[in-house]
Image: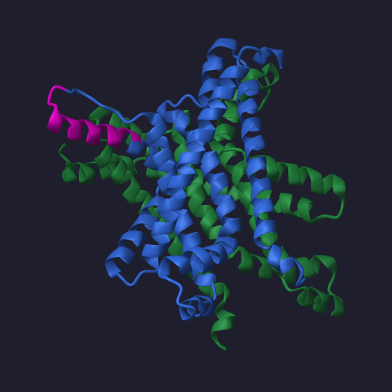
């Protein structure tokens, strides 16, 4: 067995060709997922059962099944129905890119809505009551008091979720997308040097994880700057 | 559902395979987690460094990448190793079952390391000191004082890690293990009902994860039963 260190160096730039698509999938699905998550959170926190139960069922399904299976249901499964193949959504649903984005967004939305709910439940009731006593409206209390405090509490868990999203984008390679893992798999099929190539890809992922974690710890320090002065 | 007639036994055996991978990966993950946590809490800088590198790599790399690295990499290593003894051997590969179980076990073991480390730190130092004062031996302290109390603190995260293992088993179909997702792919090439088949896979996973969640909830109730009277 010969381990070729120079092969790691030469394959790095090739794998980096997939970096754009990896980051694209990460950013687009994280943003769509966040918007969905806020909607599901509001449903989940509502007092009306017909809003709460669909949200609960959504979270239960998407957290209880593997993302890969969800991706297969959307990418391979939906075209089973003629009405989908003839609908105006077909140009989107036949693209592996959009199927990956949809699967990643729907999946992360379930997790993020629970993370945000944890944040909302962690906000001291006294603050909200104080806002009530000051005559703030329900919307003002939510936007000026609950939301900022909840976001601060949810930040560490949200950072972990972004890291796990980055790792999840690798699954897009199973539906033919050439993001970093997809590129690495192609190179391995050509060279059959799995150690060198996959280690090179791992190095890039680890650097990205490090950037995300450092970014989030900076945001957390900023969000908690009031606590430092004491 | 009659469309699935004739496939139920395949799904059943696929599920058995999934449960086998789950059990083996769980054992590996718990062992790695305990070793990793002990290494991280040890006085040796070398051990701490190794454990740190382990958790950084296995928590940072995509699960799929680790799995592929194990499956294809182990084939090369094993072939090389066997050729040292018997040069006539051309190629040996690690069965996807073992490559998958080991890879998933090591990945989730890295998460378990952090969970166990935190839980061991959460056990009151006074408890350990009291056990020492009672002249319990090291392994007795671990068995009767540190582990049971650590376990209670680790349980909620431990449950989540069990769910991760269960969901990661779906990835093993990519390297060709005949578990339920693989069965669905195979069945689809014959009956062409992809939505029905993949949805069936999703519901099987949902059933299994529901069972795991209930078991963990029961274990948590049990582990905290001493607190119930006080509340």
Looking at the image, residue B175 lies above or below residue A2: above
Residue drawn at (28%, 36%) of the image: B73
Res A71 quadrant in image: top right
State the residue lying farthest toward the bottom.
Answer: A230
Q: How many marks?
A: 0
User: Percent x, y for residue B2?
Assistant: 71, 13
Q: Is residue A155 visible?
A: yes
Q: Is residue B180 visible?
A: no
Residue B85 included in the magenta stretch of the image: yes
Residue at horizontal 34 percent and vertical 38 percent from the top: B70
Q: Position of residue A55 (x, y in %)?
A: 75, 46
Q: Nearer the viewer, residue A224 or B184?
A: B184
Is residue B7 placed above or below B141 in the rendered structure? above
Residue A4 percent coordinates (x, y): 17, 42
- Asked if residue B128 lies left or right of residue A52, the reply is left
Q: Give percent across and percent down for residue B165.
A: 51, 43
Which residue is drawn at the image coordinates 39% and 58% (left, top)? B35
Point 67% across, 41% down: residue: B210
Colour chain A is painted in: green
Chain identifier of the blue chain:
B
Specify the quadrant of the image occupied by residue A142: bottom right
Quadrant where the image shows the N terminus of chain B: top right
Asked if residue B132 lies left or right of residue A126, the reply is: left
Check the image and tell me how it is coloured.
by chain
Read off the magenta span.
Answer: B71-88
């Amino acid at each position: 067995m010969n381990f070729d260190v120079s092969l790691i160096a030469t394959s790095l730039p090739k794998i980096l060709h997939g970096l754009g698509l990896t980051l694209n999938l990460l950013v687009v699905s994280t943003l769509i997922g966040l918007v969905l998550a806020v909607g599901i959170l509001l449903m989940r926190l509502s007092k009306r059962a017909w809003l709460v139960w669909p949200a609960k069922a959504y979270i239960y399904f998407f957290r209880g099944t593997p993302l890969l299976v969800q991706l297969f249901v959307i990418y391979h499964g939906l075209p089973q129905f003629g009405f989908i193949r003839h609908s105006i959504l077909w140009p989107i649903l036949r693209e592996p890119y959009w199927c990956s984005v949809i699967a990643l967004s729907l999946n992360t939305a379930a997790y993020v809505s629970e993370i945000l709910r944890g944040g909302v439940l962690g906000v001291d009731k006294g603050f909200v009551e104080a806002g009530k006593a000051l005559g703030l409206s329900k919307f003002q209390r939510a936007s000026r008091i609950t939301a900022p405090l909840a976001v601060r509490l949810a930040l560490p868990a949200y950072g972990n979720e972004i890291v796990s999203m980055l790792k999840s984008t690798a699954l897009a390679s199973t539906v033919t997308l050439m993001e970093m893992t997809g590129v690495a798999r192609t190179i391995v099929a050509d060279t059959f040097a799995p150690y060198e190539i996959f280690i090179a890809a791992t190095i890039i992922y680890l650097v990205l994880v490090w950037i995300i974690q450092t970014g989030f710890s900076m945001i957390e320090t900023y969000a908690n700057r009031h606590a430092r002065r004491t | 559902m009659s469309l699935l007639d004739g496939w139920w036994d395949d799904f059943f055996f696929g599920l058995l395979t999934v449960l086998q991978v789950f059990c083996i990966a769980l054992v590996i993950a718990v062992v790695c987690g305990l070793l990793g946590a002990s290494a991280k809490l040890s006085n040796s800088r070398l051990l701490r460094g190794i454990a740190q590198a382990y958790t950084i790599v296995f928590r940072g790399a995509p699960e799929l990448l680790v799995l592929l690295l194990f499956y294809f990499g182990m084939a090369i290593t094993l072939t090389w190793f066997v050729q040292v003894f018997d040069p006539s051997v051309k190629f040996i590969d690690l069965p996807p079952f073992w490559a998958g179980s080991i890879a998933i076990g090591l990945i989730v073991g890295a998460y378990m390391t952090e969970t166990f480390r935190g839980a061991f730190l959460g056990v009151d130092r006074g408890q350990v000191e009291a056990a020492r004062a009672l002249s319990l031996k090291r392994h007795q302290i671990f068995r009767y004082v540190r582990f049971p109390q650590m376990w209670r603190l680790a349980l909620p995260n431990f449950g989540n890690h069990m769910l991760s293992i269960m969901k990661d088993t779906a990835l093993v179909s990519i390297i060709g293990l005949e578990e339920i997702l693989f069965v669905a792919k195979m069945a689809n090439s014959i009956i062409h009902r992809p939505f029905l088949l993949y949805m069936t896979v999703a519901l099987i996973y949902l059933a299994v994860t529901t069972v795991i969640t209930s078991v963990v909830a029961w274990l948590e109730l049990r582990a905290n039963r001493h607190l119930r009277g006080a509340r």
